[in-house]
Image (tube, helix red, strand yellow):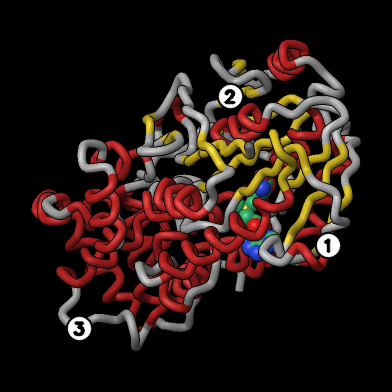
């Protein structure tokens, strides 16, 4: 089958109803489409379908007498995609409806094609009232699970609407100039000469912003390793590490190697990059190779250094801890569908464990940077407070960044602050 919308419906049902990741679903279905424009439409349908699922899935409860979610998951997903095409992608009404009805046939559901048509037509007639109804609750206005709305309301009561709205905006494309190979200004000039609308980020040393994502592998300088794709909030982590020539540095949760490469671009250091997941660790090596950098890449558990540590202390340790990813929902729209409130305690336990296991590896006078892409205080300052309460040789440094908010300890960038991803940072010094 090569009907883009039908493929999208199968993939979206896998993502929203069967727990598959957006990336896996895309990798499975995209090769069936030859035309790059069809693949781009598939990607747009899956990203916006996952992002807005909880809004339009709820709309279908009002539009359908009998729910299809369980009995006909692909047709249910197709209807969500019909609404996404009308409301989010703003495709022409006639084309969107006709193509969605056609996709029901491509899914071998000709008897449901009439229903698909009727539901989308009813939406068009009643949309003003239905939208008002959906907008009345934050869960359906922002298409977020109730537990996450509650958690953000508790942790960031004065920022809730901004955080939820910005978590749904299309993020810009951000690059990091590889200063070993090019200056940022020269790269910006090169990109502009090739008709890319590139701007240096106003307060990042290596960051470049472009308004929309595009196929970076076709951009000038990609193959030569002049840049990497990396959100600006991630680039801040390496500023805070403040690495100097000659230091031994540990990047403890390293794949795919964004921050590892940035550390190596900044100074002549001996870097050990540890990653638990062997498949993901190959991506660290690929990125190092493309950017012309070297590190000692180890597949191992950051929480059990006996498996990979040579016994010599590190001057700098970066822990980019596994977390809920609640700060990067705009780039990973499927996370909200898969993450559960009950995951948070297990993540906190992992974060505390990794921090405690790596602290003894830090040289006296050394610096440890703890980072998450979470918005939840439990994974951020609460982890640091718990750690400080048990380690008298640790002191947290006061942070003051040009963008974001002070946390009780450390600093938080919320999604949308300076158009960056949401990220938390704490810097610990060892006496
Ligand atoms: C937030 S990502 C890291 C992103 C990376 N620092 C970068 O900038 O590209 C967290 C990574 O930690 C890895 N991880 C999770 N638990 C780990 C552990 N106990 N030891 C080592 N790596 C772990 C995950 O597989 C994942 O690749």
Q: Nearer the viewer, residue 219 or 95?
A: 219
Q: Residue at x 48, y 41 (%)?
A: 424
Q: Secondary structure at mark 2?
A: strand
- Where residue 37 sits in the image (x, y, percent)? 61, 48
Q: Are marks 2 and 3 in contact (CB under 8 Å)?
A: no
User: What crowding class fits label 3: few (fewer than 14 Cα within 10 Å), some (14-19), or many (20 or more)?
Assistant: few
Left or right placement of residue 71 versus residue 391 in this view? left
Q: Is residue 81 above or below residue 181?
A: below
Tag of residue 308 = 1
Q: Which residue is mark 3?
A: 66
Q: Is residue 66 above or below residue 155?
A: below
Q: Residue at x 32, y 80 (%)?
A: 69
- Where residue 184 sits in the image (x, y, percent)? 73, 16
Q: Nearer the viewer, residue 23 or 254?
A: 254
Mark whose residue sits in front, 2 or 1:
1
**N-terminal-most mark, 2 or 3:** 3
Q: Secondary structure at mark 3?
A: loop
Q: Residue at x 53, y 72 (%)?
A: 20
- Where residue 388 sits in the image (x, y, percent)? 48, 48
Q: Which residue is mark 2?
A: 209
User: What crowding class fits label 2: few (fewer than 14 Cα within 10 Å), some (14-19), or many (20 or more)?
Assistant: many
**N-terminal-most mark, 1 or 3:** 3
Q: Nearer the viewer, residue 141 or 273?
A: 273
Query: Is residue 201 in view from this perspective?
Result: yes
Mark whose residue sits in front, 1 or 3:
1
Q: Quadrant of the N terminus?
A: bottom right
Q: Is residue 34 above or below residue 208?
A: below
Query: Is residue 415 in view from this perspective?
Result: no
CA–CA distance in space, label 1 to label 3: 56 Å
CA–CA distance in space, label 2 to label 3: 47 Å
Ligand 1 is in which quadrant of the figure? bottom right
Q: Quadrant of residue 80?
A: bottom left
């Amino acid at each position: 089958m090569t009907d883009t919308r039908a493929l999208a419906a199968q993939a979206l049902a896998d993502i929203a109803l069967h727990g598959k990741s957006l990336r896996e679903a895309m990798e499975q279905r995209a090769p069936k489409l030859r035309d790059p424009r069809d693949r781009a439409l598939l990607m747009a349908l899956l990203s916006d379908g996952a992002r807005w699922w909880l809004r339009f899935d709820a709309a279908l409860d009002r539009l359908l007498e009998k729910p299809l979610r369980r009995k006909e998951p692909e047709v249910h997903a197709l209807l969500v995609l019909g609404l996404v095409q009308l409301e989010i992608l703003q495709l022409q009404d006639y084309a969107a409806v006709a193509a969605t009805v056609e996709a029901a046939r491509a899914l071998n559901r000709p008897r449901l094609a009439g229903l698909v048509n009727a539901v989308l037509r009813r939406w068009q007639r009643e949309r003003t009232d239905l939208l008002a109804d959906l907008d009345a609750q934050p869960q359906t206005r922002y298409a977020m699970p109730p537990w996450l709305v509650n958690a953000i309301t508790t942790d960031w009561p004065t920022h809730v609407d901004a955080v939820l709205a910005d978590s749904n905006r299309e993020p810009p494309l951000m690059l990091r100039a590889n200063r070993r190979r090019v200056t940022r200004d020269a790269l910006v000039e090169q990109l502009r000469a090739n008709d890319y609308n590139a701007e240096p980020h106003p307060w990042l040393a290596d960051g470049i912003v472009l308004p929309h994502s595009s196929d970076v592998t076709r951009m000038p300088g990609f193959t030569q390793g002049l840049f990497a794709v990396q959100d600006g909030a991630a680039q801040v982590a390496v500023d805070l590490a403040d690495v100097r020539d000659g230091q031994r540095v540990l990047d403890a949760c390293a794949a795919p190697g964004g921050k590892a490469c940035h550390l190596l671009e900044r100074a002549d250091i001996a870097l050990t990059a540890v990653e638990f997941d062997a498949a993901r660790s190959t991506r660290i090596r690929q990125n190092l190779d493309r950017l012309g950098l070297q590190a000692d890449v180890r597949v191992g558990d950051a929480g059990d250094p006996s498996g990979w540590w040579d016994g010599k202390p590190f001057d700098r340790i970066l822990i980019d801890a596994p977390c809920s990813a609640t700060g990067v929902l705009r780039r990973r729209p499927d996370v909200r569908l898969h993450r559960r409130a009950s995951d948070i305690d297990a993540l906190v336990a992992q974060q505390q464990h990794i921090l405690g296991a790596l602290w003894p590896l830090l040289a006296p006078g050394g610096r440890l940077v703890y980072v998450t892409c979470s918005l939840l205080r439990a994974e951020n300052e609460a982890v640091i407070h718990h750690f400080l309460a048990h380690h008298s040789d640790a002191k947290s440094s006061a942070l003051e960044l040009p963008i974001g908010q002070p946390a009780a300890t450390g600093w938080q960038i919320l999604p949308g602050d300076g158009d960056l991803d949401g990220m938390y940072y704490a810097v610990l010094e060892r006496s």
